[in-house]
Image: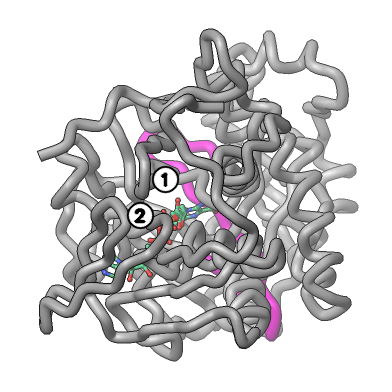
């Protein structure tokens, strides 16, 4: 553990800035461990603005590692297992929020080299124990997903991969936070400093034994090399299509996924644009997403577009997460497009730093030379403070 990071008593008072994915999860883990927690968010809980609300909720260590590297796979596989445990802890309703049916990659016949490229990119990964990338032909494709267009001749079934009903999950987490030792401050935009959270509008200061900064892209004011990466989604509703797992369309120009959600809903996503613009979805993006989904399953033609989502993924230069600690302040950020996948690794690591338990399996991954963690437990390029 860090020499500089003081051990807290179990009834310490902890302030968390940001009630998105990391903020809510840490509030839950800390309050369950007996700490008193105050959770601040700029938005209201009934109208969340976090990337976690916009996200598709895929837990896709293989698909993500193909683009992002082996650390994402290692932390992702850990995350998959941890989500199952956590959801069981959250109760029987929450336990149904995870669907572990793998995911399917398909390409139009003229683009099948995209599947070959994926196989080449994941060559090393396939040697990992438990990692399965199964080539499937049209008959098996039809068995797995009968509503997919019959034009698809080949696909890849990836396991272990899963998806979460993420909005329900956030709701279950929120319900857990109605414990007496948790105070929630909604519509409260704050800054985070060692031992202090400051209301930006009223300048009121709340002091704590420890502050956690989990503001996602909202922390750009102090983390100068954090950026937002725009992502756009469409939410469709139809009873004409049933999918059992996320389906990704591999395409040379854009990659699209469909993730099934409860109540005959589907999230179609997502664009990935190097821009911090949060204005509504563009015509081009909505055309690309909707025409691609129509080619995947023509029965989507009659689906209703019930929502178009836009949000920013918080990312550092190498698109990997970062946890830093100093007395009175821990920052956790940069979960990029893998927030749900990597959150268990990051949250358990933060808990480890706070509780001095030296159990984080990511001690080495987070580059700790001598101790079980370091005070710049940083997978990413070093955050720059302004
Ligand atoms: C379109 C899209 C699709 C995605 N799909 C997936 C997916 O399929 N799988 C996956 O694993 N990940 C996915 N992600 C990524 C995932 O959503 C993020 O990585 C994750 O939500 C980051 O968690 P966070 O807690 O750091 O930030 P957030 O979830 O964004 O939470 C930050 C919170 O801080 C609050 N805040 C900000 N500034 C302040 C302030 N000054 N004061 C108080 N509160 C503040 C915000 O209101 C927000 O509630 C997707 C993201 C997007 C945008």
Q: Position of residue 69 (x, y in %)?
A: 53, 20
Q: Position of residue 45 (x, y in %)?
A: 44, 85
Residue furthest bottom as drawn: 46
The reply to whether residue 263 is visible in this rendering is yes
Q: How many marks?
A: 2
Q: Residues within 10 Å of mark 2 (few under 14, many from 20)?
A: many
Q: Quadrant of the C terminus?
A: top left
- Asked if the residue under mark 1 is in contact with the one under mark 2, i.e. CB atoms within 8 Å, the reply is yes
Q: Which residue is mark 1?
A: 332
Q: Position of residue 143 (x, y in %)?
A: 89, 52
Q: Quadrant of residue 181?
A: bottom right
Q: Nearer the viewer, residue 156 or 26?
A: 26
Q: Residue at x 60, y 65 (%)?
A: 11
Question: Does residue 195 appear left or right of residue 95 in this picture?
Answer: left
Above or below: residue 145 compared with residue 317: below
Question: Does residue 154 appear left or right of residue 282 in this picture?
Answer: right
Q: Which residue is mark 2?
A: 213
**Label 1 within 8 A of ligand 1 by Cβ:** yes
Q: Residues within 10 Å of mark 1 (few under 14, many from 20)?
A: many
The secondary element bearing badge 2 is classed as: strand
Q: Nearer the viewer, residue 122 or 289?
A: 122
The secondary element bearing badge 1 is classed as: strand
Q: Quadrant of residue 270?
A: bottom left
Q: Quadrant of the N terminus?
A: top right
Above or below: residue 335 compared with residue 18: above
First to last magenta residue range? 249-267
Q: Nearer the viewer, residue 194 or 188?
A: 194
């Amino acid at each position: 553990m860090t020499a500089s990071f003081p051990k807290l008593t179990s009834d310490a008072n902890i302030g968390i800035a940001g009630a998105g994915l990391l903020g809510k999860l840490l509030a839950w883990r800390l309050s369950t461990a007996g700490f008193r927690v105050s959770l601040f968010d700029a938005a209201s809980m009934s109208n969340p603005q976090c990337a976690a609300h916009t996200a598709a909720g895929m837990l896709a260590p293989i698909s993500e590692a193909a683009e992002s590297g082996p650390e994402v796979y290692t932390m992702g596989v850990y995350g998959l297992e941890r989500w199952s445990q956590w959801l069981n802890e959250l109760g029987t309703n929450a336990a149904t929020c995870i669907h572990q049916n793998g995911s399917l990659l398909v390409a139009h016949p003229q683009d099948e080299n995209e599947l070959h490229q994926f196989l080449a990119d994941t060559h090393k990964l396939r040697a990992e124990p438990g990692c399965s990338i199964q080539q499937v032909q049209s008959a098996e494709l039809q068995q797995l997903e009968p509503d997919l267009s019959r034009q698809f001749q080949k696909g890849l079934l990836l396991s272990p991969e899963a998806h979460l009903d993420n909005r329900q999950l956030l709701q279950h987490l929120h319900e857990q936070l109605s414990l007496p030792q948790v105070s929630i401050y909604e519509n409260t935009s704050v800054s985070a400093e060692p031992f202090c959270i400051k209301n930006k509008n009223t300048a009121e200061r709340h002091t704590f034994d420890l502050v956690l900064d989990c503001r996602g892209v909202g922390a750009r004011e102090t983390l100068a090399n954090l950026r937002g990466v725009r992502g756009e989604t469409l939410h469709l509703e139809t009873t004409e299509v049933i999918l059992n797992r996320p389906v990704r369309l591999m395409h040379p120009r854009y990659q699209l996924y469909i993730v099934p959600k409860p109540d005959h809903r589907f999230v179609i996503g997502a664009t990935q644009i190097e821009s911090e613009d949060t204005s509504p979805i563009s015509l081009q993006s909505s055309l690309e997403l909707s025409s691609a989904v129509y080619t995947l399953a023509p029965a989507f033609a009659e689906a209703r577009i019930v929502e178009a989502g836009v949000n920013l993924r918080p990312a550092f230069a190498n698109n990997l997460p970062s946890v830093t600690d100093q007395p009175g302040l821990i920052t956790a950020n940069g979960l990029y497009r893998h927030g749900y996948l990597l959150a268990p690794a990051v949250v358990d690591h933060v808990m480890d730093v706070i509780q001095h338990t030296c159990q984080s399996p990511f001690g080495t991954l987070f580059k700790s030379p001598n101790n079980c963690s370091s005070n710049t437990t940083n997978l990413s390029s070093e955050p720059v403070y302004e």
